[in-house]
Image (tube, coloured by chain):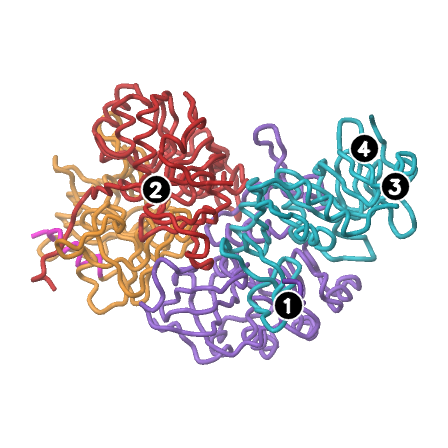
Chain colours: A red, B purple, C cyan, D orange
Amino acid sequence: MKKVYGSAAEALDGLLRDDMLIAAGGFGLCGIPELLIDAIVESGVKDLTIASNNCGVDGFGLGKLLDTKQIKKMMSSYVGENAEFMRQYLSGELELEFNPQGTLAERMRAGGCGIPGFYTKTGVGTQIAEGKEVKQFGGEDYILEEGIFAELSIVKAWKADTSGNCVFRKTARNFNPPAAMCGKICVMEVEEIVEPGELDPDHIHLPGIFVHRIIKGEHEKRIEKVTTRSREDA
Amino acid sequence: MKKVYGSAAEALDGLLRDDMLIAAGGFGLCGIPELLIDAIVESGVKDLTIASNNCGVDGFGLGKLLDTKQIKKMMSSYVGENAEFMRQYLSGELELEFNPQGTLAERMRAGGCGIPGFYTKTGVGTQIAEGKEVKQFGGEDYILEEGIFAELSIVKAWKADTSGNCVFRKTARNFNPPAAMCGKICVMEVEEIVEPGELDPDHIHLPGIFVHRIIKGEHEKRIEKVTTRSREDA
Amino acid sequence: MPWDRNQMAARAAEELEDGMYVNLGIGIPTLVANYVGDKEITLQSENGMLGMGPFPYEGEEDPDLINAGKQTITELPKTAYFDSAMSFGMIRGGKIAAAILGAMEVAENGDLANWMIPGKLVKGMGGAMDLVAGVGRVIVVMDHTNKHGDSKLLKACTLPLTGTGVVDRIITNFGVLDVVEGGLKIVELAEGVTEDELRAATEATIVN
Amino acid sequence: MPWDRNQMAARAAEELEDGMYVNLGIGIPTLVANYVGDKEITLQSENGMLGMGPFPYEGEEDPDLINAGKQTITELPKTAYFDSAMSFGMIRGGKIAAAILGAMEVAENGDLANWMIPGKLVKGMGGAMDLVAGVGRVIVVMDHTNKHGDSKLLKACTLPLTGTGVVDRIITNFGVLDVVEGGLKIVELAEGVTEDELRAATEATIVN
């Protein structure tokens, strides 16, 4: 079973349809599936619901899919870096389901792990709790949050072997493993593909069973906020 | 904050009391906290409830605590390798709460992650579901399982750095990370202690925040079932 | 003549397809690995491993490397290790295509019992309840009758259940049966076993 | 004269004790790291890192290494990376001793609002709701009044809440207050600020 595909478009072939739910990895612009996003823009598929912590920035990352109006609804925790996002939301063109960041990550993991619902204290007594079941454990209130079961996951790792085992680099890991896990099909883009045996089996962050198709390509890896200290501070 | 202690007894000082709940790592005899178990035997603490997939074998691992009758109750998925366990259970001396293996692992992780309850399809319609809340998601039945919040975790890793970051080796990882996470205090025994920086930050299996006290020692690492093939088969 | 253990395992191996991730239970299911031939099958061991290799050569056993049956094993180039929560995440999450398991009893509605005999044998369900609830396809491999000659394919299980309505296919020494609407359907007879013999050895309803 | 941003951050740093794992929010809380001195504090960044180091030298930025504010940062010898589910596992699980956060409003019962102004500003809660629900101690650092001179310490929050009854201590440019039974209690006054001045600038009930 060959998992390696030649391009993002090939890897997405047959997987896209209007009105589908896609889970995307990345935090801000860090560890985002740049190549797969571009291919989804190209495909023209529309009315997408996307579960992703952020929605890129204007003109980059998932922001490109806002510009082309291919997104119907976002499930996110933070949209503060994106003027077009806020415009579409405030004008009613875009639906937005706010999820606390940890709840979003856990909902993705839960979906991937066959857990349809779990209780959390996060958001109790806030807007987030509206319409959600409340249950007491040990005398305290918790709300029920549901697992996310996506049709497709688009994610980015540092390296994968041809059997799909993946490793991530530093904080580019972030939402990628839970997003990968919750998709019926997971397409992974990486910077390097290696042969089985080249990754230490004790160092795999995401076992190959969660990864169905793999592509390799060049990543821009844009930095959102370059912040430095001067050498004199040292 | 020094996390490294001189011995298992020192590391457990002040943490043990009768009638407490302890979560233990290991699968069968693989990756079990041998040194900490011995120290608990020595301590004489009794009426323990222990959440652990197995209970060692007769005279080794947690089996030692059965021999001394320090255990009141086990929360386990499999007890088949242990004659004394079965004897105490069938005679009513020992309580046994059967947990499906995946449910036990997830209950530990949930406790460690502040999740007091989650739904699973595992065990629906079986003895395991008795007395548990049933809820439908997508027209299917799931049962509510509760997070395990242990007072103490006793676990075993391969290496730890002095800040508590741990790595495990091969299948000795098993229940150790979830067991470590669900304890209010986690005591970790390892084969090697290294300085911060000696473990690659991308390779840490269990971040140091979950680990409060660390000891190093010699491990017998007994093999339960030596199974080999002859070289002629190759 | 009914199939022997190895023939049952060989027949079970035919259920597996290229690219599948599979979990094999203890006993006859473990033998299935010997018959997968050229198919690229990845074996999961629920104690925390994907890509399980064969038993080690004598003297090369590693106490940190065992399977779910606590036997010493080896790794392969594609192996990945993970913790028990992750392992059952992939099982419960439906990522494993098939589990091949032994059983004490199977009922015609797909109910499965394989973890305890009240008052007699208390071993525990281990990972079996999670597996039957989570994997894509549950294939039971077992003798058709118990040591008293009684059918293990029943109208209803008498022992505590491992799962309800979970079994898809049963491979016994007498042949292969599927769980279908209304009962079990004969898919294949072992060489030398007649349909009448199989029917006579089966308590469960057999449908055509 | 009320404290400036750096004095507030320095005062907040006094809240931290040796060995603590701490999460610092964006803005003034980020500055707290500059004032921890010799105390061994481990900073958590909720995008997946324990042991956050300082900003990199120019030219040494790594796009794969950012904090929760999306700023480039560096690692330390004790650093560990992990995914977002694990990161919020440790937050929700109560493993983080303290979070130091900014706020738009704090109420006298400990309610906190810091994620949106309906119709005007929609940024999202990010990880703030998880942090205030999960960490051991929530310390808010903010100006005592908004740009119109109105108190940000209120009898009740007017904006959508981030959490209810979650704030333990508030450090403002006017001083330090604790959330206690019945209202806020003054713990400390900024140098040059009188109790009358603080009371006059505060809408929330102040108890003795």
What distance separates the C-alpha of mark 1 from that of mark 4?
41 Å
Question: Which secondary structure, mark 3?
Answer: loop
What distance separates the C-alpha of mark 1 from that of mark 3?
36 Å
- Tell me which chain the residue with mark 3 is part of: C
**Crowd tier of the residue under label 4, counting other residues whose Cα lies within 10 Å: few below 14, some 14–19, many 20 or above:** some
Q: Do the residues labelled 1 and 4 touch (CB within 8 Å)?
A: no
What distance separates the C-alpha of mark 4 from that of mark 3?
15 Å
Can residue A84 be seen from the camera position used here? yes
Q: In this view, does A20 lie above or below B228?
A: above
Can residue D169 be seen from the camera position used here? no
**Any mark on residue C186, and which?**
4
What distance separates the C-alpha of mark 3 from that of mark 2?
54 Å
- Are tags 4 and 2 found on a single chain? no
What distance separates the C-alpha of mark 4 from that of mark 2?
47 Å
Residue B83, magenta (yes or no): no
Give the residue number, with chain letter if any, for mark 1.
Answer: B231
First in sequence, mark 4 or 3: give its number: 4
- Tell me which chain the residue with mark 4 is part of: C
Give the residue number, with chain letter if any, for mark 2.
Answer: A216
Q: Do the residues labelled 4 and 2 touch (CB within 8 Å)?
A: no
Give the residue number, with chain letter if any, for mark 3.
Answer: C192
What distance separates the C-alpha of mark 2 from that of mark 1?
40 Å
Instruction: Look at label 4 and name its amino acid.
Output: Ile
Instruction: Look at label 3 and name its amino acid.
Output: Gly
